Image (cartoon, coloured by chain):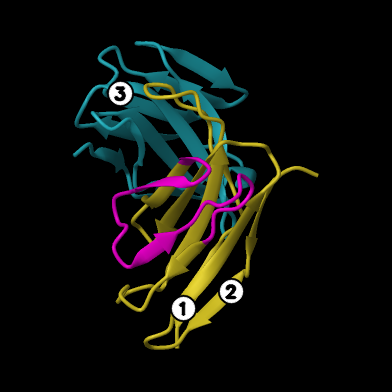
Chain colours: A cyan, B yellow
């Protein structure tokens, strides 16, 4: 079945440093979503990418969808302590059109 | 105040016991989902329902059962057949645009289930 691999599993940064998490799918995706889960909380939708090569920005966050629609990335510029949490990608694809989540990247920020 | 309500926040299960987790939404969403979250494992789909009185197995349905008698409600029963039930359970809902479309998921605050 469809698999979505996400790396790294953990990332610790100093406040002000940049951060990137990557997702790779075993199959071509129709679209990809990104979610953020704060410690002790629940996932919250950040964005959806649909078009090949699409780039979207939300303040310090930049989301990219690969040309082949099999990979995606989330980049945070100048991290802040409020960015702490686990970031998940979730891809829609395959024959069953179900959303498949990556295992997430846990970001911790040292103030 | 629209949203998804899960209860209880914490639940303990004894050996051989069935327990039911509640999920209610007032977003008027057609689709509802149950996910299981284990540390370092991401979210895995247990069951989902696109319409009242219909539901489909997800990737890890064994040992679980669901019902969808009302649009607003999608309870999950963890049966005694589920040998490793300790996990964080998340309910979600979305609008449903049919196959090959996708809508964003709204999650409840989750239920932490532990075995006594």
The residue beneath circle 3 is A29
| Residue found at x 43% / y 41% | A88
The total number of labels drawn is: 3
Residue A24 at least partly seen: yes
- Mark 1–mark 2 Cα distance, whole angstroms, equals 8 Å
Looking at the rendered structure, whether the residues under marks 3 and 2 are on a common chain is answered as no
- Residue A103 left/right relative to A2: right
Residue A60 image point, x, y percent: 58, 26
| Circle 3 crowding by C-alpha within 10 Å: few under 14, some 14–19, many from 20 | many
Quadrant housing the N terminus of chain A: top left
Subunit ID for the residue under disc 1: B
- Mark 3–mark 1 Cα distance, whole angstroms, equals 35 Å
Tag 1 secondary structure: strand
Judging depth in this view, the residue of A92 and A4 nearest the camera is: A92
Give the quadrant of residue A80: top right
- Residue A67 left/right relative to B14: left
- Mark 3–mark 2 Cα distance, whole angstroms, equals 36 Å
Do the CB atoms of the residues marked 1 and 2 lie less than 8 Å apart? Answer: yes
First to last magenta residue range: B50-75
In the depicted structure, whether residue B14 falls above or below residue A67:
below
| Residue found at x 44% / y 78% | B18
- Residue B48 left/right relative to B1: left
The residue beneath circle 1 is B114
Tag 2 secondary structure: strand
Tag 3 secondary structure: strand
- Residue A62 left/right relative to B86: right
In the depicted structure, whether residue B75 falls above or below residue A38:
below
The residue beneath circle 2 is B10
């Amino acid at each position: 079945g469809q698999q979505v691999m996400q790396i790294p599993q953990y990332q610790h940064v100093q406040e002000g440093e940049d951060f990137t998490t990557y997702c790779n799918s075993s199959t071509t995706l129709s679209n990809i979503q990104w979610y953020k889960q704060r410690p002790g909380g629940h996932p919250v939708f950040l964005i959806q990418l649909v078009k090949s090569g699409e780039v979207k920005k939300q303040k310090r966050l930049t989301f990219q969808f690969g040309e082949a629609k099999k990979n995606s990335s989330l980049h945070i510029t100048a991290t802040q302590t409020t960015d702490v949490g686990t970031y998940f990608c979730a891809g829609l694809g395959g024959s069953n059109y179900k959303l498949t989540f990556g295992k997430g990247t846990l970001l911790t920020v040292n103030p | 105040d629209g949203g998804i309500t899960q209860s209880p926040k914490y639940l303990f299960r004894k050996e051989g016991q069935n327990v039911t987790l509640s999920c209610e939404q007032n977003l008027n969403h057609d689709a509802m989902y149950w996910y299981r979250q284990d540390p370092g494992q991401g979210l895995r789909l247990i069951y989902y329902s696109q319409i009242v009185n219909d539901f489909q197995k997800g990737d890890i349905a064994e040992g679980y059962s669901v019902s969808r008698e009302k649009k607003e409600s999608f309870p999950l029963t963890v049966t005694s057949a589920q040998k490793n039930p300790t996990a964080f359970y998340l309910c979600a809902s979305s609008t449903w645009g049919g196959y090959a479309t996708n809508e964003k998921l709204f999650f409840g605050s989750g239920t932490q289930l532990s075995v006594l």
